[in-house]
């Protein structure tokens, strides 16, 4: 089995998928940070394709960066300056060629994640 990475974003405050969030993926190697992918969430809160496809997969340390500020404004959260959550980075490791699913559960003042299936 070849490895790949998927993600999605759920708005836990409103109980719905979070559409229109830009997501960047970086591969980390020591102090080096290389951008290897970018996508946006669709109406289902998912990206239309894996953010890291099978042909591009390599084990290592990665970071998903969720640009949530514009979505939170559109969803009706009052925008303070600076916004409590604007950009949410998630750093994680992938140690084997498998399907990794790393979702973001988002609300205006907190978030969580897990390794899904």
Image (spheres, grey):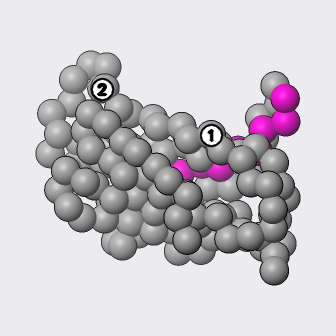
Query: Mark 2 Cα within 10 Å, few/some/many (few <14, many 20+)?
Result: some
Query: Residue 25 lies in magenta, yes or no?
Result: yes
Residue 67 spot, x, y in % from top left: 45, 43
**Quarter of the figure that contains the C terminus:** bottom right
Instruction: Please tell me which residue is depicted at 74% across the width and 70% down the height of the picture.
Output: 98
Question: Which numbered dot is residue 91?
Answer: 1
Residue 20 shows in the view: no
Give the structural element (helix, strand or loop) at label 1: strand
**Quarter of the figure that contains the N terminus:** bottom right
Work out whether 12 lies above or below 85. Answer: below
Residue 108 shows in the view: yes
Relative horizontal placement of residue 74, taking residue 48 as reference (left or right)? left
Q: Which residues are magenta?
A: 21-30
Q: Main secondary structure of the magenta part?
A: strand
Query: Residue 95 lies in magenta, yes or no?
Result: no
Work out whether 15 lies above or below 65. Answer: below
Q: Which residue is mark 2?
A: 83
């Amino acid at each position: 089995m070849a490895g790949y990475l998927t993600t999605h974003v759920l708005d836990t405050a409103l109980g719905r998928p979070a559409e229109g969030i830009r997501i960047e993926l970086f591969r980390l190697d020591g102090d080096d940070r290389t951008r290897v992918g970018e996508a946006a969430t669709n109406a289902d809160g998912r990206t239309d394709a894996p953010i890291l496809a099978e042909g591009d997969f390599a084990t290592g340390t990665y970071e998903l960066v969720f640009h949530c500020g514009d979505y939170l404004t559109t969803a009706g959260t009052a925008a303070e300056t600076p916004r409590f959550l604007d950009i949410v980075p998630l750093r994680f490791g992938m140690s084997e060629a498998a399907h990794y699913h790393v979702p973001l559960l988002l609300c205006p003042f907190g978030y969580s994640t897990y390794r899904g299936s």
